[in-house]
Image (cartoon, rainbow, N blue to C red):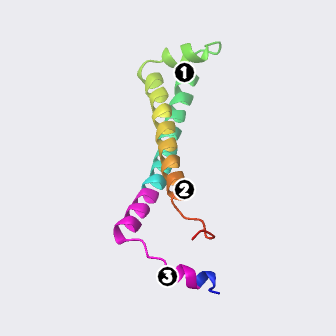
Amino acid sequence: MRSTTARSMWQPAPSAGETLQSKSRSELGRRAILVGWLITMLGIAGYIVAMSRAGENADILDGLMGQGLIGWMSAALILAGVVTWFIGNYACLQDLADIPASGEE
């Protein structure tokens, strides 16, 4: 009876292209998560500035959109950052799904 290490030793190794593609997709996902977080934080900073410039009794939508460019840009940055963050998470989860389970043959 063969051990699991002997069994895995006889399995073909992944090609260099598959390994490189997996590493690049994983790295792309990690970078997208970090960039998405950074973009969202910039949008939140713009949101804080826009809401602090609005009046005390301002509604969220009126206060944000009534500030002109800074309000619209902060909303767009938050949206773009969250979308980029989700794309990075999806890429990382796809990379994890491609890793075979250790007990499979």
Spot occupied by residue 46 in the image (x, y as percentages of width and height): 50, 31
Say which residue appears at 58% left-offset and 24% top-offset.
52
Indicate the amino acid at tag 2. Answer: Ala
Indicate the amino acid at tag 1. Answer: Arg
In the rendered image, residue 72 lying in the magenta stretch gets the answer no
Spot occupied by residue 7 in the image (x, y as percentages of width and height): 56, 81
Quarter of the rendering containing residue 1: bottom right
Majority SS type along the magenta span: helix
Does residue 82 lie above or below 16 as drawn?
A: above
Q: In front here: 24 or 52?
A: 24
Q: In front here: 105 or 73?
A: 105
Which residue is label 2 attached to?
A: 97
Q: Is mark 2 on a helix, strand or loop?
A: helix
In the rendered image, residue 17 lying in the magenta stretch gets the answer yes
Indicate the amino acid at tag 3. Answer: Trp
Q: In front here: 26 or 15?
A: 15
Does residue 67 lie above or below 41 as drawn?
A: above
Which residue is label 3 attached to?
A: 10
Say which residue appears at 48% left-offset and 23% top-offset.
71
**In the rendered structure, which disc, 3 or 1, sits on the residue that comes first in sequence?**
3
The residues colored magenta run: 6-27
Q: Is mark 1 on a helix, strand or loop?
A: helix
Which residue is label 1 attached to?
A: 53
Say which residue appears at 41% left-offset and 22% top-offset.
69
Spot occupied by residue 30 in the image (x, y as percentages of width and height): 49, 55
